[in-house]
Image (cartoon, coloured by chain):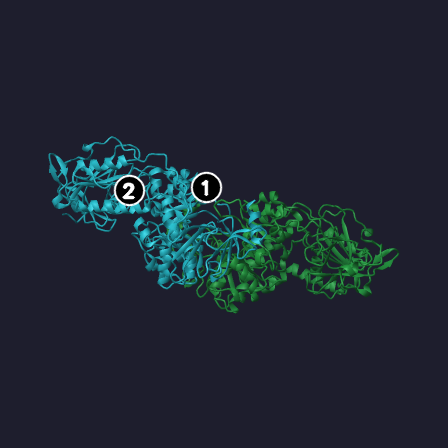
Chain colours: A cyan, B green
Amino acid sequence: MKLEELIAAARGEVEVDLLIEGADVVNTLSGEVYRSNVAIYDGTVVGFDCESAKKTLDLSGKVLAPGFIDGHVHLESAMVTVPEYARAVVPRGTTAVVADPHEIANVLGVEGIRYILDSSRSSPLSVFVMLPSCVPATSLETSGASLDAPALSKLIGEERVLGIAEVMNYPGVVFRDPSVMAKLGLAERTRFDGHRPRIDGHCPLLSGRDLAAYVAAGIGSDHECTSSEEAKEKLRLGMRIMIREGTAAKNLDDLLPLVNEVNSRRFLFVSDDRHPSDILREGHIDSMVRRAVRAGLDPVVAIQIATQNAAEYFGLLDLGAIAPGRRADIVVLDDLEGLSVQKVLKGGAVVAEAGRLTVPQREAPMPRSSSMKVGEIGPESFDIKAEGDLVRAIGVIPNQIITRSLFTRPKVEAGKVVADIERDLLLMAVVERHKGTGNVGLGLVNGFGLVRGAIATSVAHDSHNIASVGTNSAEIYRAVSAVKEMGGGLVVVDGGEVTAPLPLPIAGLLSDRSMEEVVEKIEEVVGAAKNLGSSLEDPFMTLSFLCLPVIPELKLTDRGLVDVNRFDFVSLFAGDGEEDATSPEER
Amino acid sequence: MKLEELIAAARGEVEVDLLIEGADVVNTLSGEVYRSNVAIYDGTVVGFDCESAKKTLDLSGKVLAPGFIDGHVHLESAMVTVPEYARAVVPRGTTAVVADPHEIANVLGVEGIRYILDSSRSSPLSVFVMLPSCVPATSLETSGASLDAPALSKLIGEERVLGIAEVMNYPGVVFRDPSVMAKLGLAERTRFDGHRPRIDGHCPLLSGRDLAAYVAAGIGSDHECTSSEEAKEKLRLGMRIMIREGTAAKNLDDLLPLVNEVNSRRFLFVSDDRHPSDILREGHIDSMVRRAVRAGLDPVVAIQIATQNAAEYFGLLDLGAIAPGRRADIVVLDDLEGLSVQKVLKGGAVVAEAGRLTVPQREAPMPRSSSMKVGEIGPESFDIKAEGDLVRAIGVIPNQIITRSLFTRPKVEAGKVVADIERDLLLMAVVERHKGTGNVGLGLVNGFGLVRGAIATSVAHDSHNIASVGTNSAEIYRAVSAVKEMGGGLVVVDGGEVTAPLPLPIAGLLSDRSMEEVVEKIEEVVGAAKNLGSSLEDPFMTLSFLCLPVIPELKLTDRGLVDVNRFDFVSLFAGDGEEDATSPEER
């Protein structure tokens, strides 16, 4: 039996598997750094010396830290499978992540969550899962699944499932939406008094009594703080502060000044949404540790934040420290100044060296379900019959996910509204892809800058229907059809031809290729989209957020145009006087 | 529903029950002290202001801290019921204890544990329970119960049961005794990876590989450290260090120098065994906080150690801090220098003021089982037939629980060994009281100093049979009979008459009277015993440890004399040459 063996190995009665010699150990429990050997048996640290070892590993001059833990990540943002993600982040020192499979769950529901669990089962990266709390994100769109409390309850007790993921619907908490309350109630299934699964938060700028209400509901963390003042209030109320450095949202510099010796235990490092190119270029949790130390944080505290603090919050008692009985997930650093990852041990075995994964990975299973159930559509599905003199148009604001709601006169040809290249007024469509409803939402968008062709993507928050923007309905149809035929992905259509496809066959969100290849492909499709005339930094990312009906002002879903401020649908054609009543702006 | 109400109260939609105004709050989460109101609804902190409150409480100039938590206590050492214990410690700021009902479980088994749980169900003191891991303590005595892993497994998931109590049998861990391993295995019933019930440790002076083995087995704490060096090694290995200030064992002064800003989160305060007179005179966890601060510890850190750290270790997420969603268990202190407890709120209600409990307590149930099942005994049961010229005698060492094994010539009259007052060689007996076996262990003891009469007690570690020491078998019989007739307790017999009884009718361990009365009675019985000629500080405490067969050198149980070094029985009459072979000492 395992425990007996472990004890015997710790006592030196049986030969240990590995003895690491000569390195300094960062002890995240005692807060010290000191020279110590480390003995490992059956994947577990058993002590600091031994009678005899099958192997020894001389790491003289190096520093050993526990494996880094990402406390909150949407793996889907990296657009690759779990094995590919592991191949990228494990050599950078990350040995565990707490994933919120929010995106894939919006497409595939429970099957998507199980896919993340299954495809990480024997990974060199430990993947823990928080159950997505907001599937679907709203009632204004068609998602691939609906995960209510009874559906989540089947997963809550499973291995590696740690609780309920970020409760983005904070109005639902504060105003006690019954479906939200039922989800919070899942975490109340307590084994001990007060001892329950974790519930992560997401409450940007929430403050005062509403924040107190949100915390009183049992929500234990927040990763949306953008200022030290905001984080301080949340800290005082008892939330763990997850310092986030994603691709779009970067909060380390703003939050670090708040960390001190009496409160540092309440902080974690998280990546949330980090795009593949950033992971390859900057790194992962390791880059946060380095930046924090360069900004003046004690390296031991920075490493505690990256390891033990997350282990403690999530109750992962066997992670976060190099100590007897804990998993031998160990990062070998050059020193406490450089903090550069030299090697990574996972369960006592070297799995990465010099930035590369050195172990083969088991091929991960693929989801069984097709995620491309598009109803009957044809080129005519994208025609907008002219029904008035005034239309609403989505106004893109570069590098922001909010939009403006514009009113304008449409260009009409043969009774149809058409794109007006002169005024950068393009056609936009969102095609439902989960249930074959045939829903096509149609609208107009300003600010994309395409002068010919069309682009389309199946990555479109939060329901991930197929979104397209183009200069004519024929090429939009071509682009949407190409996405459908690839089983999901990003395409550019120019002159009726697909010029730069990035297939994302897994749920229309993830590639089955390497992260390097994905980065290259993204550069290609973005380049091709820019070739069509767009001056946006990443037209696909902009497009993916034009569907998100929780961020103001005007968005488009498969069910139609949404006035986010009213949280309801509005018609494309505006009535007399409406423009004055709702918006001061018009082109 | 509760959670909805709480959220509404936090938002100010409903009137809160209480608003505390004007005090400074010790925030154990952010590590700060600042002026803040505290709003309480339905026993729970909901925030820091409110629209309107049913009551307000002006505590201007005072300091609010979370209720203190005793991380490890044997309530039986206080010799009173849970309500009486609560009456003593709650006014001193303790609002929760983690109890190991080791003593009562050795008498009553599962019923004893349930008694502790039942009698604390609606107490102003939250009583959590760790399941005793060592019942019986040894195979060399008859205990009232035997709690193996299957027996404990029925309790492990119950409300307020947090895990497995101090695993005193550390050789059993290190050498993988199957029954010990089975008990450790109970805590492996994990809900999440690595997330499991706590197992407390007890491993005085264990070090090096054996300590690593003990920690690798999953044992998370130790309260037996007597030096900073010992604690440092355990801290490095990942144990939480419980700093103990009991009646006999006091470790605060020795361990405090180890506490610093990077490791303080790993310490707890515990009382372990604190006698009623010490509780009344010195206090409880409050006295440890005061002493730590006077010794130079930051008051906020001292309060974290007394509150949040225990809550965190035991996973008591709703205790340990004054924050939304946490129980409103609040200690009102004069200031951070005096640290004197002025008032105590439990679940938002004032339950103690000026050192007194101000709320009535529900009468606690009594155990149903009699704990006095003594077999047929008579005066002749205590006769020792002379069967040799050389006897073993237990040598008392004042103020220690270890004894010496002596050899001497017995005084013999009419074929019986009798007490020899001149040489302070008295008769000792241990009468089995759990199963009516009629077992009577007989021996001789030197060092008690009685010149007449006898004393007897049903508090006799760890099996709590009836132990007696006296100058003649008739008075020993009288004393044992008196204990039996009282249903347990302490007595002194002088001239054939009981002069000072302290009845302990609950399991023969606990009084049904007030702590003050118990203290007074103890003084009486100890005084009466001293009147018989004993110069020991507390002859009853000395007697109670003469039965404990895990502490060297010679002990007496109901089954006979035990040579602890050999961990086996030895005969009262020694063979030729045995004295030389086993001990250099003889009187």
Residue type indicated by callout 2: Val
Q: Secondary structure at mark 2?
A: loop
| Rendered location of residue A542, percent (x, y) | 24, 47
Q: Which residue is mark 2?
A: A459
Residue type indicated by callout 1: Glu
Marking on residue A351: none
**Residue A131 visible in the displayed image:** yes
A481 or B62: which is nearer to us?
A481
Left or right of residue A255: residue A346: right
Q: Secondary structure at mark 1?
A: loop
Residue located at (15% from left, 47% from top): A586
Left or right of residue B413: residue A29: left
Residue located at (13% from left, 41% from top): A410
Tell me whether circle 2 and circle 1 mark residues in contact (CB < 8 Å). Answer: no
| Rendered location of residue A159, percent (x, y) | 46, 43
User: Taking A532 as reference, is B70 above or below it?
Assistant: below
Screen quadrant of the N terminus of chain A: top right
The chain containing the residue under callout 2 comes to A
| Rendered location of residue B297, percent (x, y) | 50, 67
**Residue B493 visible in the displayed image:** no
Q: Among all residues in the image, which is located at the extreme right? A: B414
A4 or B279: which is nearer to us?
A4
Q: Which residue is mark 1?
A: A158
Mark 1 closeness class: few <14, some 14–19, many ≥20 residues within 10 Å: some
B526 or A304: which is nearer to us?
A304
| Rendered location of residue A131, percent (x, y) | 40, 43
Q: Earlier in the sequence, mark 2 or mark 1?
A: 1
Mark 2 closeness class: few <14, some 14–19, many ≥20 residues within 10 Å: many
User: For the residues marked 2 and 1, what is the alpha-carbon distance in whole angstroms?
Assistant: 29 Å
Disc 2 versus disc 1: nearer the observer: 2
